[in-house]
Image (cartoon, grey):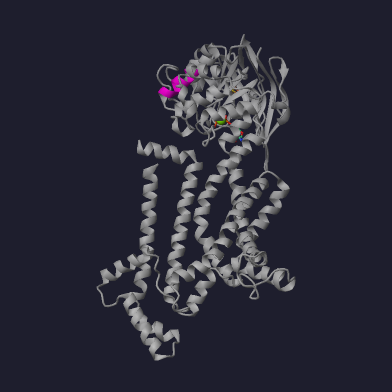
């Protein structure tokens, strides 16, 4: 098991109180596995991704733990977490378009970054990685603004994976790109796994159909909690959670052509995470809700590798 | 690159031409006879002298020639460095009078602008990283920038000059010393220079420090900083990038501030009766010395334009984005 997250709770401190953006989430990611993380806006996907590598100043690690390759990650301790970053856990951020220092030539920036982490730049590795994502070597002599959006995205992917991290987090890396570029970026990501550069990956996106194309397992979150986790095929063909069902239904012919469809079309909105109501958080919008849903449904493994948090999971 | 500078130069040349033209037009299109009113105000009592000056100025203005020729003559004279003759210290050429004052103004401005710029930026960068320093730099900075040049100058003159008696409050050097290259004179010069320099330095300092602090904080929250932090890069590297990138808008800021800085220097000179261009303007106005005033203004316009051009060049040298943008444009 590469990554194991157990009952992770991460809150945002705000003036109005704690925003419980991650409220007890558990899951595993195996060696060589790509986990697709989906769910509508605000459900805590970015929070989860950041928790695994670097929390921002307002995030608090409230409970639960994260293990990577059998070693516990000190995610709440910025300083102790630092040795793991880049070496063990790495990130392809949502903001890849602006992730590189605009006033440094890319090659020089990469060299300075590596040296600052005490690693010597291995030109051959760097070049082979550029080949892997289909970038010409001369991009190293260029400034970031001289690259197209898709090129910047791929360049950041190369930088992030230079030290062969065990876990790579990719947060919404395709949302700023057009459809054909999305495809090539997703393919490049999968290529990193294929060639063994990264062991496992958490791929965050709104776009279920894109997730379906590259992920082995899909995890759907709802309002800071896990709703359902299943192998990609199962998730699309036989979802059990009412929320997931509605999501899948709103995507005709998943994975075929409708890559631009986003999660949408479910009436109502998720509850506030500032002071979430007790019981199932999907209750207000769930067509199947009944008395028991006033209690919180625990995640249950209905079949191997298929976890659902719903009282009606068997229905 | 060449096209970029060509365009810039053209804009500066046009600005200069407009300034010169306006300068040329004002005395000619003012109601009344400029020569007569100038002579009347000049308080020259001997009739012969008045007559001599009238002839001289009428010739100089070339008032009997057609306007377009007067205009061309004006430019011609300008290129020969001929700004006319001063009334106040008749018959010294205006250019000589100006050149006597320029070293004082430059000697004040260049060190105070550069030093306040570098020190201010450094302080601002430090403030951005330390809470305690920030809590002092910010309010002090705001007070300094909000202080009018004149007011700070008066305050310093009063405090360090009149009350403490440490520095002289007026003049470029003591009346008792003849200008020469002796150590005594240079020391005296320096002594007189301290207060006006310091008041210019202080007022500008606050603005740079605040600007830099805000820019650095902005850069430290930018995406590339976040990315580097996520990859565990040390703060040293991130701050180095942030400082450099924050410096770029500050360079533009310097260009924009130049006019204000010049105005501040002129006012400060007047407060300290420092013998630079500022005091010269005052003298020219008091003595109705129109040519002198005209010459000083042209000179200042030229100086500001040249400084702006230099800053343009510096900016292109330090910001690769402008360079690549230009390469793209000319390719
Ligand atoms: N800095 C913050 N302070 C307070 N609350 C925050 C902060 N950042 C995020 N949140 C809250 O935490 C919850 C989860 O946010 P998160 O960014 O993880 O969502 P997400 O699933 O990534 O959404 P999206 O798909 O829009 O990116 C949201 O309800 C959001 O309002
Ligand atoms: S637990 Fe109840 S409310 Fe929640 S999803 Fe299942 S049926 Fe709907
Ligand atoms: Mg997000």
**Residue A262 visible, this angle:** no
Q: Position of residue B260 (x, y in %)?
A: 52, 61
- In the picture, measured across the screen, residue A231 lies left or right of residue B176, that is left
Picture quadrant of residue A122: top right
Q: Is residue A184 magenta?
A: yes
Q: Is residue B17 magenta?
A: no
Residue range (magenta): A180-188
Q: Percent from the top left, x then y, of residue B190?
A: 65, 64
Classify residue A284 by image quadrant. top right
Front residue of this view, candidates A30 and B246: B246
Q: Vertically, is B94 above or below B225?
A: below
Of the 4 image quadrants, the one containing the N terminus of chain A is top right
Viewer-proximal residue among A170 and A288: A170
Looking at the picture, tell me which residue is in the foreground, A291 or B263: B263
B243 left or right of B42 in image: right
- Total count of labels: 0
Instruction: Name the residue furthest right.
Output: B164
Q: Is residue B133 visible?
A: yes
Relative to A90, is B323 above or below?
A: below
In the image, residue B4 above or below residue B171: above
């Amino acid at each position: 098991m590469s990554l194991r997250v157990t009952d992770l709770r991460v809150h945002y401190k705000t003036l109005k109180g704690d925003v419980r953006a991650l409220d007890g989430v558990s899951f595993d990611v195996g060696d060589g596995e790509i986990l697709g993380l989906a769910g509508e806006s605000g459900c805590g996907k970015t929070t989860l991704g950041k928790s695994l590598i670097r929390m921002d100043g307002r995030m608090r690690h409230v409970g639960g733990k994260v293990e990577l390759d059998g070693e516990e990650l000190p995610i709440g301790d910025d300083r102790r977490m630092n040795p793991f970053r880049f070496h063990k856990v790495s990130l392809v951020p949502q903001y890849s378009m602006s992730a590189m220092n605009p006033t440094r030539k890319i090659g020089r920036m990469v060299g300075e970054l590596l040296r600052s982490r005490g690693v010597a730049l291995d030109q051959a590795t760097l070049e082979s990685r550029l080949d892997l994502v289909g970038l010409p070597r001369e991009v190293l002599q260029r400034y970031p603004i001289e690259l197209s959006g898709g090129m910047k995205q791929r360049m950041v992917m190369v930088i992030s994976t230079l030290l062969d991290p065990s876990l790579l987090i990719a947060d919404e890396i395709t949302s700023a790109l057009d459809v054909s570029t999305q495809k090539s970026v997703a393919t490049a990501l999968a290529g990193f796994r294929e060639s063994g550069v990264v062991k496992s990956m958490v791929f965050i996106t709104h776009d279920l159909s894109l997730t379906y194309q590259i992920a082995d397992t899909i995890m759907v979150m709802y309002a800071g909690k896990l709703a359902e986790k299943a192998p990609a095929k199962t998730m699309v063909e036989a979802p059990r959670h009412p929320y997931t069902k509605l999501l899948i239904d709103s995507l005709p012919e998943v994975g075929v052509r409708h890559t631009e469809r986003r999660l949408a079309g479910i009436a109502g909105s998720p509850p506030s995470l500032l002071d979430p109501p007790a019981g199932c958080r999907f209750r207000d919008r769930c067509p199947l809700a009944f008395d028991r849903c006033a209690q919180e449904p625990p995640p249950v493994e209905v079949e191997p590798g298929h976890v659902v948090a719903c009282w009606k999971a068997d229905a | 690159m060449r096209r970029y500078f060509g365009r810039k130069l053209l804009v500066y040349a046009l600005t200069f031409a407009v300034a010169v033209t306006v300068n040329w037009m004002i005395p000619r299109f003012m109601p009344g006879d400029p020569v007569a009113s100038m002579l009347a105000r000049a308080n020259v009592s001997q009739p012969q002298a008045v007559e001599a000056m009238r002839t001289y100025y009428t010739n100089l203005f070339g008032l009997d020639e057609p306007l377009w020729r007067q205009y061309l003559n004006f430019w011609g004279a300008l290129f020969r460095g001929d700004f006319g003759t001063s009334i106040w210290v008749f018959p010294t050429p205006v250019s000589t009078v100006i050149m006597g004052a320029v070293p004082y103004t430059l000697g004040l401005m260049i060190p105070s602008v550069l030093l306040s710029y570098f020190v201010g930026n450094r302080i601002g960068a430090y403030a951005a990283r330390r809470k305690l320093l920030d809590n002092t730099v910010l309010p002090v900075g705001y007070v300094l920038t909000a202080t009018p040049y004149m007011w700070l100058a008066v305050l310093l003159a009063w405090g360090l000059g009149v009350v403490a008696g440490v520095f002289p409050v007026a003049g470029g050097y003591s009346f008792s010393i003849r200008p020469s290259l002796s150590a005594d004179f240079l020391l005296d010069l320096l002594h007189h220079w301290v207060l006006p320099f310091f008041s210019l330095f202080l007022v500008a300092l606050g603005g740079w420090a605040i600007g830099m602090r805000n820019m650095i904080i902005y850069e430290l929250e930018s995406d590339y900083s976040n990315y580097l932090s996520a990859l565990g890069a040390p703060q040293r590297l991130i701050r180095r990038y942030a400082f450099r990138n924050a410096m770029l808008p500050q360079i533009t800021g310097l260009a924009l501030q130049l006019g204000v800085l010049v105005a501040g220097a002129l006012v400060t000179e007047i407060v300290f009766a420092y013998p630079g261009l500022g005091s010269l303007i005052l003298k020219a106005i008091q003595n109705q010395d129109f040519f002198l005033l005209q010459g000083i203004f042209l000179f200042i316009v030229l100086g500001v334009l040249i400084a702006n051009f230099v800053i343009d060049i510096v900016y292109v040298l330090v910001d690769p984005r402008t360079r690549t943008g230009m390469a793209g444009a000319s390719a």
